[in-house]
Image (cartoon, helix red, strand yellow):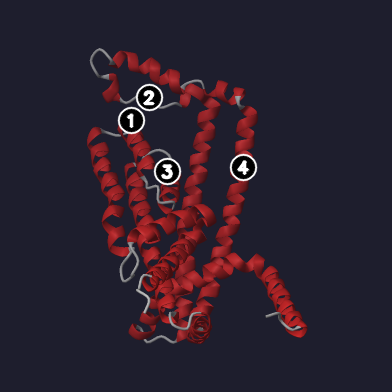
């Protein structure tokens, strides 16, 4: 049945209004998404502060915001300083060539028969950095430009994250009114499954924050502490790469292997052995904690959540880390309901 002309005009006007609103809010979309995710993650803490410390909604949200800003700015500043130090070391290494290269590990040189041949091979593989720079100067310049652009983009993203934290604190203050409006919207959209959708969304976001982001930061913290305590070269750069690999669900093993090569090259054997045990324990930590945290309280298999985490991260970056498992969990839930309903025999 065709729509009346007046109804069609109204529908087109509403669609145009919705599109215009979406285009206006598009520059703030990332901030709004992050603020919503942070509000969902921090809601239990907000309630705990109100109950245990007897703080009002504004005071509890303000305390979360201040502590969050300090937690974000402090480690990022320290990591940036370490990265600058590591970059200066790399520049010094490139400028001075083989004079700044590390010597081969003593354990390798002392191997009978093979040991004396290792030193020239070691320097042959690592020595001629000046020739490498001269030969690939254009490619290295382009790579440096891309790295600089990426760094500036990440800095802008970090500023957006700080703004998102402030906005999330405001959302926590008005969380009851926002939840009421969300429930009304879900009841209009999916009347029979509104509560389930809200539960899956909130629980998935919180589980991912604990099982992926929390474990990633814990692993990176342990690895970074071990590298700094053992005075491993380029510890800041290695820690930053470890954090990125953990968030991408690749794991810190590549960084750990590089760090162990450096450790056994520069440190006494006993200290290198202790660092090896420490780094291996930190690497294996995710296999113990993730199964306990990821699918806790959810009617969704952990494999679905992990697929959402990986796919969402590859598609939409850090925000996709949370949006991916939420969307995939909801899709899995509704497909399971549809299959279960359709498999029932017809009366």
Q: Nearer the viewer, mark 2 or mark 4?
A: 4
Separation of residues labelled 2 and 4 (CA atoms): 32 Å
Any mark on residue 265, and which? 1
Q: Which mark is residue 146?
A: 4
Give whichever of discs 1 and 2 has the lower sequence position.
Answer: 2
User: Which residue is under mark 2?
Assistant: 103
Residue contact between numbered discs 1 and 3, judged by CB atoms under 8 Å: no
Q: Quadrant of residue 46?
A: bottom left
- In the image, taking residue 263 as reference, residue 187 lies left or right, namely right
Q: Earlier in the sequence, mark 2 or mark 3?
A: 2
Which secondary structure, mark 4?
A: helix
Whole-number angstrom distance, CA of label 1 to CA of label 3: 16 Å
**Which residue: 38% across, 40% down?**
254
Question: What residue would you read off at disc 3?
Answer: 238
Q: Secondary structure at mark 2?
A: loop
- The image quadrant where one finds the C terminus is bottom left
Label 4 or label 1, whichever comes before in sequence order: 4
* Residue occupying image coordinates x 63% and y 28%: 137
**Looking at the rendered structure, which numbered label has been put on residue 160?**
none
**Tags 1 and 2 touching, CB below 8 Å:** yes
Rendered position, 338 above or below 268: below
**Closest to the observer, 181 or 102:** 181
Residue neighbourhood size for the residue with mark 2, other residues' Cα within 10 Å, grouped as few (<14), some (14–19), many (≥20): some
Q: Residues within 10 Å of mark 1 (few under 14, many from 20)?
A: some
Residue 269 % position (x, y): 24, 33
Across the whole image, how many numbered discs are drawn on residues?
A: 4
Is tag 1's residue or tag 3's residue first in the polypeptide sequence?
A: 3
């Amino acid at each position: 049945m065709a729509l009346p002309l007046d109804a069609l005009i109204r529908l087109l006007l509403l669609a145009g209004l919705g599109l215009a609103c979406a285009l206006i809010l598009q520059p703030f979309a990332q901030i709004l998404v992050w603020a919503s995710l942070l509000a969902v993650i921090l809601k239990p803490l907000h309630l705990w502060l109100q109950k245990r410390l007897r703080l009002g909604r504004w005071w509890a949200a303000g305390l979360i915001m201040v502590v969050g800003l300090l937690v974000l700015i402090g480690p990022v500043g320290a990591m940036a300083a370490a990265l600058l130090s590591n970059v200066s070391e790399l520049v010094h290494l490139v400028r001075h060539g083989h004079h700044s290269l590390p010597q081969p590990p003593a354990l390798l040189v002392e191997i009978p028969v093979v040991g004396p041949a290792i030193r020239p091979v070691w320097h042959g593989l690592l020595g001629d950095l000046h020739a490498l720079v001269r030969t690939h100067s254009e490619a290295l310049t382009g790579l440096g430009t891309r790295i600089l652009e990426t760094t500036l983009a990440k800095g802008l993203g970090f500023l957006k994250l700080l703004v998102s934290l402030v906005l999330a604190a405001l959302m926590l203050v008005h969380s009851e009114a926002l939840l009421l409006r969300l429930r009304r919207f879900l009841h209009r959209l999916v009347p029979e499954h509104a509560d389930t959708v809200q539960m899956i969304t909130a629980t998935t976001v919180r589980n991912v924050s604990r099982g992926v982001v929390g474990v990633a930061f814990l692993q990176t913290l342990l690895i970074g502490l071990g590298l700094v305590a053992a005075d491993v070269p380029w510890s800041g750069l290695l820690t930053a790469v470890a954090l990125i690999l953990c968030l991408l669900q690749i794991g810190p093993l590549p960084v750990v292997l590089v760090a162990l090569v450096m450790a056994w090259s520069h440190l006494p054997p006993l200290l290198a052995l202790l660092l090896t045990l420490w780094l291996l324990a930190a690497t294996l930590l995710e296999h113990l904690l993730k199964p306990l945290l990821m699918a806790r309280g959810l009617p969704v298999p952990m494999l679905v959540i992990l697929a959402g985490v990986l796919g969402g991260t590859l598609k939409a970056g850090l925000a996709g880390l949370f949006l991916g498992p939420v969307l995939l969990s909801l899709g899995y839930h509704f497909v399971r309901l549809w299959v279960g309903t359709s498999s029932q025999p017809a009366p």
